[in-house]
Image (tube, grey):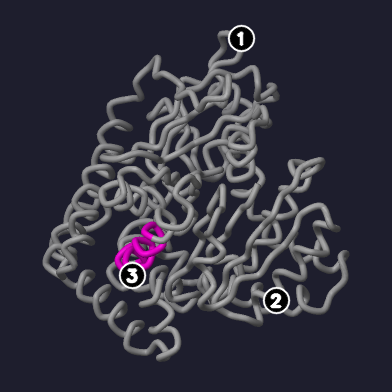
Amino acid sequence: MILAILGGSAYSTPVLVQSLLATAAGRTLTVRLAGLSSGRLRAVARACVILSNGTIQIEQFGEGEWKAALNGSDVVVIQVRVGYYDSRHFDETFSLEYDIPGDEGLGPGGLSAAWRAWPHIRAFCSDIQAFAPRAQTILLSSPGSLLVRLAGSEFPSLPLTAVCELPFTTLQHICAVAGVPRDEVSFEYAGVNHLGWLYGLEWRGEDLLAGYIAGNGSRGFPEASLISRLNAFPLKYLRLHYEQAAVVEEQKQRVRSRAEQLQALADEAFEIYGLGDRNRIEATLQKRKAEWYPHAVVPLIRFWMGENVDVPLFLSMGRGDMHERCFFARGGKLQPVPRRKSPSGEVEEILERFVAYERIAAEAILERTEDALSEALSLHPWVSGSLASALAARIVKHSSAISSSATQKEVEWLNSR
């Protein structure tokens, strides 16, 4: 099996290789790392070789070689960050001036990331169709559900999927606090990527959320009163929705944005990847565990390799509205978990507002006009209509600045995709 990683020089990539080791035993597995920065690519490849200890074949593909990396691949992972950490910093901070939470994949920040990324993701999709037409493709670039929706509209035959670990790890947390085995729990789920609710949780006929609250699991977010009101457990990123003012104040008080923190971790990691031994590399991976790899990406790859998978998979795929759905891999097929119960009216109402927003946001990104971007932002649950125009102007200005400040070498590479 050949796995190609577009954006393979990301400093989290060795976690994916480490997580694949059990799957690779007794198999021929090749991981192709495609990156733009030759120095970072070499460092990441060295770390992956050390971690895999010969079990996985690691190959490097630098600038101008990405199409060769795709050629004949069985699985492709897209984890490109357009604009690097500087742009993530912008996405996380510019909306704070308008008292709106900042995030790389949600709210105005998420739309900014999608506006900037889509032309490049679109080019990658075209290349995948041309050079790896049978490959299953996993999208990790943010914002997942919006970019999958865009890809589905322009590449309807491309099997592209966004996968998220957060519903599963949240389920694990609830079960641990309630003191019940996860595989004996029945549940329902409703959401879009990173914004979802677990509900209908039962263990042997008992209400698991009541057990969670009784186990003192309702300290912090979400509070017991919110769980009871919704009769559901919101994922952690919904704090940006339910506790917007508090989140904004906390983000304003940060000395460094999350992007700046990750940049510092990445700089340290690349040095260790390039020079450190196995122990130092493994210690570095613990500083950011990248749980989306072991709990979501690798189980999906294992399924495609014909293995049994015993964890639920939360996927956004197909065309149209991107509701994130829960699947189980059974009998060699991904089987969606049928909905037995509907969430509360409050949950359904806010979910449909997010879905409606993404529908118009996708149209705006395809139209590529500031007015269309403003119209989309005016529909977002966190944005008042009076702020939409100013936010749209900031997004377009930043994207234009990124494009004009790119080196000629980068421009030629991006245009050649």
Let me know if residue 247 appears in the view: no
Q: Earlier in the sequence, mark 3 or mark 1?
A: 3
Q: Earlier in the sequence, mark 2 or mark 3?
A: 2
Which element type, helix, strand or loop, lies under badge 3?
helix
Which element type, helix, strand or loop, lies under badge 2?
helix
Q: Residue tagged by mark 1?
A: 204
Report the front residue among 5 and 336.
5
Name the residue: 21% across, 70% down.
392
Question: At which x and y percent is residue 225?
Answer: 44, 33
Q: Residue 349: within the magenta?
A: no
Query: Mark number for residue 318?
Result: none
Q: Give the overall secondary structure of the magenta segment.
A: helix
Question: At which x and y percent is residue 230?
Answer: 38, 29
Query: Mark number for residue 116?
Result: 3
Q: In this image, 51 relative to 198: left or right? A: right
| Picture quadrant where residue 345 is located | top left
Instruction: Name the residue type under label 2.
Output: Arg
Report the front residue among 119 and 57.
57
Q: Earlier in the sequence, mark 2 or mark 1?
A: 2
Give the residues drawn in magenta, as a range.
Answer: 113-126
Instruction: Name the residue type under label 3.
Output: Arg
Query: Mark number for residue 42?
Result: 2
| Mark in the foreground, 2 or 1 | 2
Q: CA distance from mark 2 to mark 3?
A: 27 Å
| Picture quadrant where residue 15 is located | bottom right
Label pair 2/3, CB-CB below 8 angstroms? no
Question: At which x and y percent is residue 57?
Answer: 75, 58
